[in-house]
Amino acid sequence: MLTVLIGLTGALIFGAADFLGGLASKRISPIRVTAVAAAAGLVGLLLVLALGFGAWSAEAVFWGALSGVTGALAISLLYACLAIGPMSILSPLTAVVSAIVPMTWGLLSGERLGVVGSLALGLALIAVILVGFVPEKGAVRPNLRGILMAIGSGAMIGGFMILIDQTPDDSGLVPLVMNRTVNATLMFTTVGVLWLLGRRAARTRVPETIHEDAAEVLHQATAHGSAPISTGWKPGLALAVACGVVDALANALLLIGIRLGDLSVMSVLTAMYPAGTILLAAIVLRERIAPVQWVGLALALVAAGMLALA
């Protein structure tokens, strides 16, 4: 019961972090948001770790750092596939894959759930699809590139969970500190490289047909136009910092849940994170929740109840 409660709470908090990250990305670029959020989360985790919540070891450092690499890849692929779209298909596809990969690993590693637990996981996967599905008017079918990126992103998220599960029980927050350290380093390096490429492109005259394509890629990667960056940097920065702190809290709950329960259960419950995002969007932004999403939320509660009984 406690594992299920932690899993659902963590999923809602993950969704809140995504909501804050989405708002921040409207003011500053998504890559900058990711970098700032990783740094803010790292600071928060270091403050808590200083209180003695974790023991350093070679295993904790190695697996935590490796999970930071998978996390950076997951975020990069996620932004890329959602940019291609349609989000209504690729977003839930990413969530489902992120649940299936660690769930399969856990079951192959010897975790046993019984009939009720197995049915609950299947129902939860259906709930993930329905909750994450946002109908888009005139949405086109995703191309192969977008599908492969979504699957890759989901696999990397699942890989993050598997790697975190390998860390010693007494490591506490050490793996998450290493995760954020590597993640922040990679993302800030990416921001720096893109900035340098942008300056070089601005100074170098190239054929117009080539320059337009390159400029568009750099524009999408580093900014949403000059006005949003100059006028929205401070509120965007604050939202990015909040996103990082909230996301770090969600990861801490994920780690606790994995320690107390099964990886297969936590992976599916965590994949319900879109529920937190759509609920906050409905409350704060007055966005309408589609009927299919209400069905998904109801199924998620039923699945959670079944897992608690199992």
Image (cartoon, rainbow, N blue to C red):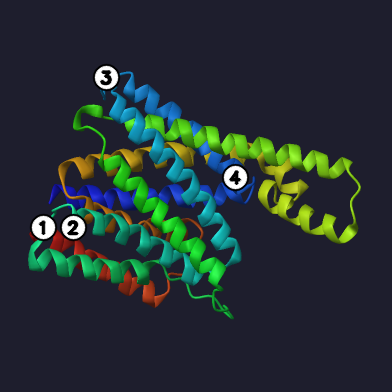
Q: Compared with residue 93, is residue 112 higher up or lower down, i.e. above or below?
A: above
Work out whether mark 3 precedes mark 4 in sequence or the reverse, and give the earlier one. 4
Q: Please give the residue where the numbered disc 1 appears in the rendered image.
A: 112
Q: What element carries label 4?
A: helix
Does the CB distance between marks 3 and 1 fall below 8 Å? no
Return the residue nearer the eye: 63 or 125.
63
Q: Please give the residue where the numbered disc 3 appears in the rendered image.
A: 52
Crowd rating for badge 2 (residues with CA inside 10 Å; few <14, some 14–19, many 20+): some
Give, as a three-letter code, the residue at label 1: Arg
Residue in the picture at 60% in, 61% down? 83
Q: Please give the residue where the numbered disc 2 appears in the rendered image.
A: 107
Q: What's the distance in space between the residues labelled 3 and 1, CA to CA?
A: 33 Å
Residue in the picture at 30% in, 71% down? 126
Judge from the rendering whether residue 173 lies leftward or rightward of residue 247; answer left or right. left
Q: Please give the residue where the numbered disc 4 appears in the rendered image.
A: 31
Q: What's the distance in space between the residues labelled 3 and 4, CA to CA?
A: 32 Å
Image depth: mark 2 or mark 4 in front: 2
Residue in the picture at 51% in, 56% down? 78
Q: Count the marks: how many?
A: 4
Crowd rating for badge 1 (residues with CA inside 10 Å; few <14, some 14–19, many 20+): few
Work out whether mark 3 precedes mark 1 in sequence or the reverse, and give the earlier one. 3
Q: What's the distance in space between the residues labelled 2 and 1, CA to CA?
A: 7 Å
**Where's residue 305, x and y in %?**
15, 62
Work out whether mark 4 precedes mark 1 in sequence or the reverse, and give the earlier one. 4
